[in-house]
Image (tube, grey):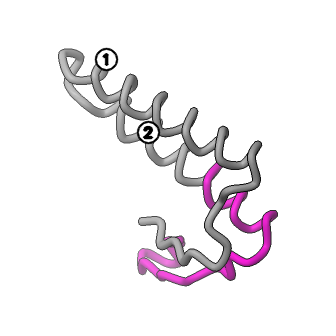
Amino acid sequence: MSLNISRRKVDFFINMDSPENEKFCEMTRRSCEDDRIDTLPLRDRRAAREVETRRRAQWDGEQALGQASPGMALLVR
């Protein structure tokens, strides 16, 4: 995850053993991805949105089945 503090980017890792932290990181990633897609040229947005929709469905399905990877380190930029 990155924070912009006084115009400096600070990267840090979150303990992914916690389901709450894992969900927080995923929601943050989704928000960043939505922002990225919104900046794409119009002709590219639809395909990017479809890819992201499939990724979200897969993640949601894994969470529902309890198959998330515990301890997986995630670095969001």
Mark 2 crowdedness (10 Å alpha carbons): few <14, some 14-19, many ≥20: few
Seen in the image, is 3 located left or right of residue 61?
A: left
Label disc, if present, on residue 14 of the rendered structure: none
Looking at the rendered structure, the kind of residue marked 2 is Asp
Report x, y in % for residue 3: 53, 72
Task: State how far apart marks 1 and 2 are (Cα).
Answer: 14 Å
Most foreground residue, 38 or 13: 13
Q: Report helix, strand or loop for mark 1.
A: helix
Seen in the image, is 13 located left or right of residue 43?
A: right
**Residues in magenta, as a range:** 1-27
Labels 1, 2: front one? 1
Report x, y in % for residue 40: 25, 31
Residue 9 is one of the magenta-drawn residues:
yes
Looking at the rendered structure, the kind of residue marked 1 is Arg
Work out whether 4 lies above or below 52: below
- Which residue lies under the disc numbered 2? 35
Mark 1 crowdedness (10 Å alpha carbons): few <14, some 14-19, many ≥20: few
Report x, y in % for residue 63: 72, 49
- Which residue lies under the disc numbered 1? 46
Dot 1 or dot 2: first in sequence order is 2
What residue is shown at x 65% (from left), y 59% (from top)? 68
Most foreground residue, 38 or 76: 76
Report x, y in % for residue 15: 68, 82
Which quadrant of the figure has residue 18? bottom right
